[in-house]
Image (tube, rainbow, N blue to C red):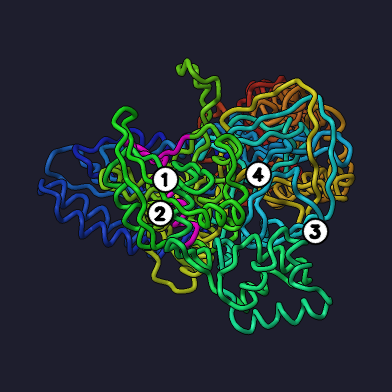
Amino acid sequence: MDKLQSYKLKKFINELKAIRGRHTELVSVYIPAGYDLNKIINHIAQEQGTASNIKDKNTRNNVIDSLEKMIRHLRLFKKTPENGLAVFSGNVAAQEGKTDLKIWSIEPPIPLNFRLYRCDQTFVLDELVKMLDVNEVYGLIVMDNRDGAVGLLKGTSITVIKEMTSGVPGKTRAGGQCNDPDTPILCSDGNIIKIKDSHNPLILKSMNFNNFTIKDSPITDKWTVNKSKVYEIITKYPQLKIRTSKDHIFFVYTKDGVIEKVAEDLKNNDVLLMPEKISIKGKIHKLNSKKYYNSFVITNRGRELLNELRLEKKLHQKQIAKILGLTQTAISVVELGKRNIRREFLEKLCCVLSIDFEKFLDEFTEPFKYKDINLPEELDIEFARFLGYFLGDGCVERDRITFFEQRKDVALQYKEKFDKYFGLNSSYKFRESKNYHQIKFTSRPLVRLIKNQFPEFRKTFDSEIPENILTSNDEIIGGFLRGLFDAEGYVTRSSVSIAMVNKYLIQQLQLILLRFSILSSFIEHDNKRNPYSKKHIFKLQISEKKSLQLFKENIGFTAEDKSKKLIETIKDKSEKSHVRQILINGSEVRKIIEKCGHNLQLFPQVSGFFRDKRLMSKQTFERSILSKVKDTILYKKLEEIYNYNILPVSISKIIIEHKKQELVDISVKNQNFIANGVLVHNSSQRFARLREEAKHDFYKRISDVVNKEFLGMKDLKGILVGGPGMTKETFVHGNYLNNELKKKVIAIKDLSYTGEYGLNELVEKSKDKLAEEEITKEKEIVNELLTMLAVNTEKVAYGKEEVRKAIELGAADKLLISEVFDAVEEFETLAEKYGTKVFIISTETREGVQLRDLGGIAAILRYAIS
């Protein structure tokens, strides 16, 4: 905005400032640059209808008439002016009850970027007043290898256009990005293992960043590294914990998209990524339970086969008996089918005769049940539930499984259910002295089955969820979790929780719950209040409403009181969620909506999201955006964003431990994997190039913003660049800035800061250059006048009447008017009529004072006049 535009704008504002309405009847309308004028006219017409509801008759008529006058005025424009339009209308009559409707409009010297309709007692002029502060516009760039910011200096106001983080990691060698050996990682088949137990070519779950889906990716390498410093990174809800080396790379969500950061550069409130749901097809596991029975009946063909193979080996029954430590009679009765055979005996016999024991069991035997027991042939939902309950509240002896339960109704339900399931008659007893209900399932085959098929059931502190469970389908996992939560889970007014002394088991649970999209927090307690144990307590807590609903639908409780309490907890929960949030920026969503030709007025409650002021939960996105969209194409695009299978989770704390520790490093083909719920980078071969690639990408992102914002900006006077180190010189002299913008770089300054502080420091350190730039043009034109006055007086006119005459004769080429001159607008209008260039000169320079002393007005002539 030049001095002349500033003068006109100031006069316009002062005129409207003086007007006061008696009621809220003065109408202000701001139309942004590029906005469809017809939509504004239609909107004002709608407001006319609304105004008919105003109770006061005079106010109602004044508003309706003002709006009508404004509509007629706007119809004079073929389209919205280039910088937008500000229109004002109202009754300015001095006396009550009189009508004097007037309308004003102005195309601002600076583009409007917002829309406004307001009825008030005064006109809304704040945005126009702000424009008066803008004298010159300069582009600002501050940067180093880690951070950057682009802004504008308008007068004394600094506006941040964009702040960016580079993702350039600290200097480190390849192979340094390591995790704690006990970190749980997620395999493609659903198994959860410690990273120290991983190997090539084990396949892990990995993220596809093209569409934010979970895919499979094999491990390509693994090694160990000794480190002297370990970073423990803890997120907010859901609370996840991961221990890594300082140079392990994480994916961090920013306003500029997903970038990469090493652990030592992470800060509180940085946003990491986690999967929302892990989809595993799973499978049904056959248990081959037959081999766990105590004894078997051999079929006729089986007995014949035993006899044939014994004869082939040229062994007598007596010789076989001697090898097995039995009598000849024992071998004879088996071959004759007169007696069932014990499992141990049959296994040894098969070994002597070179027979596949399990195959022989399947094809030629039937279990002989001394006591009725039906062992499951496959891992189904009910058996999985039994195993979950056993892991939580059970213990195993040589020939029985015992459960200990606090609730009688749960104990009796489990007794009834699994008596029927196994065909047993378990014993029930209430141990009054210990206040628990005891159920005993006595069956050595059942004990044998559990011990052999599920070796992960060990002691309390080191049991794990069995691999057969983890690699099963979701229904079976749901059954297992139902049993485990029946045994150990509890409900409070705000959450469902489960607590154990077994840390790794809780970590496995946290990952396995993602199969159902249940988000949970890992919490550690030191257990100091318990005088009998120094063991830490590890708790899993589910408190988000949707996660609680999913828990109820897929897992639930057997205990009636727990079930009722869960329903009440869900009912009391707010629909708001700070957990399950949309990953894509609101500004990107806004662009998609606008590109499809839709107005943001469809979504009045989420304007802050569209301005990137906040993230938005998926629940709110579905309710406030998706549900409002009728356009099929737009709905599909927004639904795709809604269904992205990745969530932002912010860091709450980073703990640095100074101790020597061996850490494990793996390389994954797809360059990322899920470690204890957090999506992390892996140590791939490209790490050596990561810094340079990240720097180049960072410079390119900054240049894209600069070129987009500054190129073609009419009022851009120059560009200031600053920052610590040599990064700024590399950026300016490299092939990043457009050549036209390079020419406008007027200063490169060394700074201590980047970001918003850096922008302020850059302006402060460039004051001398800015002052010089601002007054140079004024000095030049005034010096031209003074030189002409000294050497060629005939081609100069000064004083009001002499200058007027020169302009009217068409002789005035350049008109110089002091900002304190009393007839600026009159002479500007006259000059415009005759094609004379106009310059408004301040009095802040010596040259400006000289013009003021010449009468405040002078002209440089095209030719001399008499």
Region rendered in magenta: 475-499
Sequence-first disc among 4 and 1: 4
Q: Which mark is residue 555?
A: 2
- Mark 4 residue type: Pro
- Mark 2 residue type: Ile
Left or right of 151, for residue 510: left
Which part of the image, by quadrant, shows the N terminus?
top right
Q: Which mark is residue 184?
A: 4
From the image, tell me which residue sits under label 3. 201
- Mark 1 residue type: Phe
Quick one: SS at disc 4? strand
Residue 396 x, y percent position in the rendering: 51, 44
- Mark 3 residue type: Pro
- Distance (Cα) linking label 4 and label 2: 23 Å
- Distance (Cα) linking label 2 and label 1: 8 Å
Q: Which mark is residue 485?
A: 1
- Whether residues under marks 2 and 1 lie with C-beta atoms below 8 angstroms apart, the answer is yes
**Please, is residue 363 above or below residue 849 in the view?**
below
Left or right of 407, for residue 423: right
- Number of other residues with Cα within 10 Å of mark 1, as a class: few under 14, some 14 to 19, many 20 or more: many
